[in-house]
Amino acid sequence: MTRPTSAAALDARSGAARRSTGVAAAPAACAHCGLAVPEGFVDEERAEQFCCAGCRTAFTIIRDHGLDQYYGFGERKTAPVRSTGRSYEEFDHEAFHALHVSRTSEGLSRTELFLEGVHCASCVWLVERVPLLLRGVARAELNVGRSLAAIEWDAGQVQLSAVARTLESLGYAPHPYLGIRRDEVRRREDRAALVRIGAAGAIAINVMLAAVAMYSGVLSNGIEGEFERFFRWVSLALTVPAILGPGRVFFSGAWAALRTRTLHLDLPIAIALAAGTARGTVNTITDQGPVYFDGVTILIFLLLVGRYLQQRGTRAATDASELLSSITPRGARVVDDRGAVRELPAAALLPGMLLDVRAGDTIAADGIVEGGRSAVNVSLLTGESRPVAADVGSQVFAGTLNVSAPLRVRVERAGEESRVARLLRQVEESTRRRAPVVVLANRLAGWFVAIVLVLATATWLVGIGGDSSAALDHAIALLVVTCPCALAMATPLAVTVATGRAARRGVFIKGGDAIEALARPSTLLLDKTGTVTEGRLSLVRWDGPDWVKPLVVALERESTHPLADGLRLGLTDDAAPVETSPVESSEHVTGAGIRGTVAGRHVVVGSPSFVGRQASAPVPDEWLAAGEGILATATPVWISVDGVAVARAWLGDPIRPDAAASIRALRDAGWDVRLLSGDATPVVRAVGSMLGLPPDACRGEASPEDKLHEVETLRRTGRVVMVGDGVNDAAAIAAATVGIGVHGGAEASLATADIYLTTPGLSPLVELARGAGNTMRVIRRNIAFSLLYNVAGAALALTGTISPLIAAVLMPISSLTVVLGSWYGHSFPRQAARSA
Amino acid sequence: MSIVYLVLPLALILVLAAVLAFAWAARRGQFDDLETPALRMLHDDDPPTREPPA
């Protein structure tokens, strides 16, 4: 990537005056982020130019501390710094420390923060230089994969809020990471698993070496009895710690299965390990017959690796969704008696407190508006796509977004008592009630375990009439050779490969059972707002001459109404930039529109009745007809200039561009696609008809409870996949066979979803359904292969012709087949073709 | 061939040392993050710089 930035920054660093050449001709690039510098910001007097104050601050900080090496990294990709001016005061609060901060052995405080906008090597470099910038910060370590920075600081010298402000000024907005405690447990589990794998691998390889010596002895002219005995004893000495150490997990698994009276793969594994080791020990002591040590130790190693891979794959997906959920604000701005504003953690809010909610902030508690007039986006709770007006006296809810102007809110219910918390409790409940999907491999494993156990017992009982020692050997040979090594790895490997590739394409899958449930078509419920549509108000159609646009844009700048915002952004988005005209006067009429004088002309923008009333010339007849299609779901806005109605605009929630094609593809594949929305039924039907869905497949006015009920009703007759984004969908998502959260969704729906999509639009859904089908085919092929090997091995063992050599060759081959089959199976396309 | 009585235990002692070293590294968290260290080594050492300002 060649960016103009690096050059600019290099110039700046060497102090070369760049002023003389082409700064004015070509748009200057910001010395920090590389974006074009807006006209008004170009400062001819200076060598480096900045696109905003945030970038200037970041550049100055970096430069003043001698860190300008940062600008030399070729891979650097910096987002423009948008400083929010937050004080991060809540980071110093006791409640925050109790939740997130721990003490290190050196007496320092330690926490982990989730940073936005971490991409590459230069981010690591910059974040880890924070100790240089702030006295008292002992250590800052960044994990790029998870965007988590571990910070250790001396609480006596510096406060965490100062660290947070420094990180923000560098362009990485910090958020508290919620999973710290459980993370510690996981980390310990992970490390223990790694140690087990390492030990098991080292032992297995060395036992194999001894086995190779013994086998080659058998194949050539024979091995001296003395050395064979030595190798056997060495193998035994190595196998015992393998069983007692890393192998112990299988015995505890088998014991747990026995206690709950279920057939689990651990059971025959444990029996085979125990029987193989016991018989091998007896044979070593009596110096006759095969020792099974090589098979036993390799088995332990391979099974541990399979489990570790599976665990990591599913955990990566869970992690990603949790990190995203850390972004939701945890703080609130509280106004005290003297009118000063302080930041407090949301958990510390009490009824009666007065909140200051800025435009763009999420409201932290349920309450009554005491001051200000704004619009609130409640789509999170209700699915309603149009912002609701909030005035003094209106009720607002926690989790909803204040869109246009500051509000003062008196807290009525906070924390656990708020409406959104009650909804979340329902979500938890339906998660608990959900019956686990029985995975194909587990069902098969049950049968497999039963058959192997019966066969082994039968072999032993039949043979016992003749040579009882040989009968036992045959039974053990059967157990070892049929060890479900490949079978146990068939599903985890295929699922790991599939989830890994899906994650690279922006689809995070939390569990293998979701893949199985998606492999065959069933009912697919789609939420409307934010899932099928974009979930925000924007201009869907403009019907009028272009010369009106600058007048409208100028006038709408005076308004904070969400419709005004949508209209203004929609009109300025055009390729041709709009030259705005000066506004001489303007007047808002609540619930109707805005009028004013722009460039000497009288302009009125507002509802049809408002504009129609004021127009001196009659309105064209066709304007009075009701809109069709998307226009039926949109809010019309009329514009008149000097008393003549000249233009119409429609503002609505546009359908995502790939929605229609994706839904068609899913329906063609056999899915029963339905819309389920909290929005008004006619709106839902209109959107449905545009997507090619019949009216009876579109249900509107569904409350969160209705959605949950609908999913539960459908589940009684079959599988249900629920796709949604808001808290109002979370309970339904949790109750569905497979719940899918979409891009930009609420924390709750991300947390309960089995799968979530990080790329916008519905096309990942199509990809997901296709990939799931392919993955299941790979799994079935893997299982078929491993069963084939096991059947062949069992046949040989039953007839008593199996030798340790054949068993030792068969087992790795079957595992290798499964590994190769999983890797080259076409689950999801391997190359990431991520659309931005 | 009887050298094997000496060499094999020696080899096993080496293996034990390797396993212990691995366990030590894993428990210290050296395998927790496999991505960042690969990027961190790209950075040059800090030049013997100015004092961080107070």
Image (tube, coloured by chain):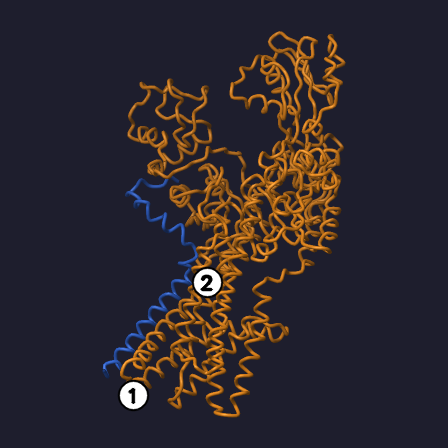
Chain colours: A orange, B blue
Q: Secondary structure at mark 1?
A: helix
**For the residues tagged 2 and 1, is the chain the same?**
yes
Amino acid carrying label 1: it is: Glu
Mark 1 lies on residue? A226
Q: Chain of mark 2?
A: A
Residue A338 location, quadrant: top right
Q: Are marks 2 and 1 in contact (CB under 8 Å)?
A: no
Q: With respect to residue A368, does A299 lie above or below?
A: below
Q: Secondary structure at mark 2?
A: helix
Residue A220 location, quadrant: bottom left
> In this orientation, does residue A254 appear?
yes
Q: Is residue A103 left or right of residue A556?
A: left
Between A434 and B46, the one nearer to me in the picture: A434
Q: Position of residue A806 (x, y in %)?
A: 40, 76
Which label was assigned to residue A818?
A: 2
Q: With respect to residue A396, does A548 lie above or below?
A: above
Q: Is residue A489 left or right of residue A415?
A: left
Q: Position of residue A697 (x, y in %)?
A: 72, 42
Q: Residue at x 49, y 69 (%)?
A: A788
Q: Residue at x 23, y 82 (%)?
A: B1
Q: Chain of mark 1?
A: A
Q: Position of residue A370 (x, y in %)?
A: 72, 32
Give the alpha-carbon distance from disc 2 to disc 1, as whole Å. Answer: 39 Å
Quadrant into which the N terminus of chain A falls: top left
